[in-house]
Image: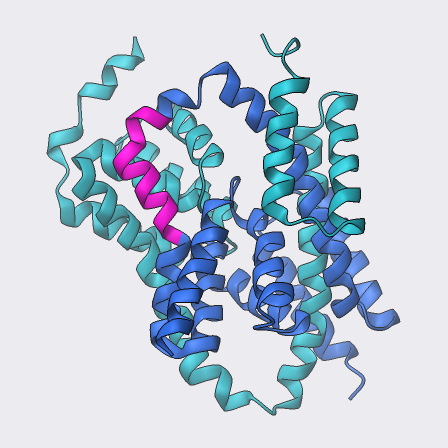
Amino acid sequence: MFSQICSLYGSFLKIGLFTIGGGYAMIPLMEREIITGHGWLTAPQFLDIIAVAEVTPGPLAINAATFIGYRLAGVAGALAATLGVVTPSLVTLLLLGGFLSRAILDPRAERFLRGLRPALIALISAAVVTLSRAALIDLTTVLIAAGIFITAVAWRRLNPLYLVAAGALLGLLAYPY
Amino acid sequence: MNRSSRAVQPKAVSLPTIFLVFLKVGAFTFGGGYAMLPIIEREVCARRKWVSEEHFFDLLVVAQSLPGAIALNSSIQIGMRLRGIAGGILAALGVIIPSVAVILALAAYFLPLFRDNVYLKAIFYGLRPAVVALIGAAVVNLGRSVFRHWSDIALAGALLAAALLLKIHPVIILLGGGLSGLILFRRRCA
């Protein structure tokens, strides 16, 4: 039990440390750590957790960490995973805040970030490909995904909450009972 | 100039106020970090005048370039600007506590009640493709702002191939992208 709490903290520390750009940036890392790496969850279970994290208040990364931690090791696991994912924010901003806010403006940091963003896009695209296999299981789910994708791209300022709610409603209507 | 507003406010804000404002932001904003930013902005810039719009934009850039959730990173910076380290910690706690409390309540009490419910199964049957679609849309929307030159697209394509075909670890891909940026964009970024 104690070793699982420690490895949860370690995994989410890694996830927090390399989530640069917030929210969706952590999906590929979580997938690697939690589904492929440790085999802690299956892809459909992971997607269910992201869906719940999306409709509950607060940042996606924190909601997902709390939920996954709870699933794997109860309340202690939830706290360990949450602490892991917020540790990099706390350490970098509280201890190195002033220094880093200036360092970010350095031209080298700017070039590093300019290369990091395409890498992030590549990783999130790769995660979409792998997660599609778990989510798009028949024609109905493909149509639901297509409709929501087009809406989200066409109307980019729409709160994702509404689109998740639309997915739930379509699921209720179209599920092969 | 407006920059002088940096020195005006700080001492006036109490620590419990910082905590409660971010607790409210954490508890009532749905839809993840990007949905929280306009709410934080309204609360700390328009309503309370804790930071100027211009300074808020500066701290967003820092929040997006450092590790961690964007809403959390922005909140910590605002808290720190008002009351130093204690302010930063209380802002962080305010944002985190509602998340943890709501998820724990759901995971521990509510979802188990419906475990074998057919309607819950139907809901998740529709939620999974919705989530994949949202992540896919995030790729497109990110691409619109990130891809400014063919070399950005080429870099993303090469790294996508490396991630999918060679199954290289995401951390290596990220560091590879960053290092390529250091080398590739040497001349173009003035």
Image position, residue A88 (x, y; %): 38, 45
Image position, residue A4 (x, y; %): 42, 73
Residue shown at 77% from the left, 49% from the top: B166
* Foreground pick, A88 / B4: A88
| B150 to B169, vertically: above or below | above
* Foreground pick, B104 / B41: B104
Instruction: Tell me which corner region of the image, top left, top right, bottom left or bottom right, holds residue A169.
Output: bottom right
Give the farthest residue toward the right.
A139
Chain in cyan (letter): B
Q: Could you tell me if residue A94 is visible in this image?
A: yes
Q: Is residue B163 left or right of residue A30?
A: right
Q: Is residue B39 left or right of residue A166?
A: left
Specify the colour of chain A: blue
Query: Magenta region: which residues?
Result: A86-100
Tell me if residue A95 is in the magenta stretch.
yes
Instruction: Tell me which corner region of the image, top left, top right, bottom left or bottom right, holds residue B9.
Output: top left
Instruction: Tell me which corner region of the image, top left, top right, bottom left or bottom right, holds residue B28.
Output: bottom left
* Foreground pick, B26 / A166: B26
* Foreground pick, B64 / A176: B64
| A112 to B86, vertically: above or below | above
Residue shown at 61% from the left, 90% from the top: B117
Residue shown at 84% from the left, 64% from the top: A143
Q: Most prominent secondary structure in the magenta stretch?
A: helix
Q: Is residue B14 left or right of residue B58?
A: left
Q: Could you tell me if residue B43 is visible in this image?
A: no
Residue shown at 73% from the left, 47% from the top: B163
Color style of the picture: by chain
Image position, residue A177 (x, y; %): 78, 89
Query: From the image, which quarter does the N terminus of chain A lie in?
Result: bottom left
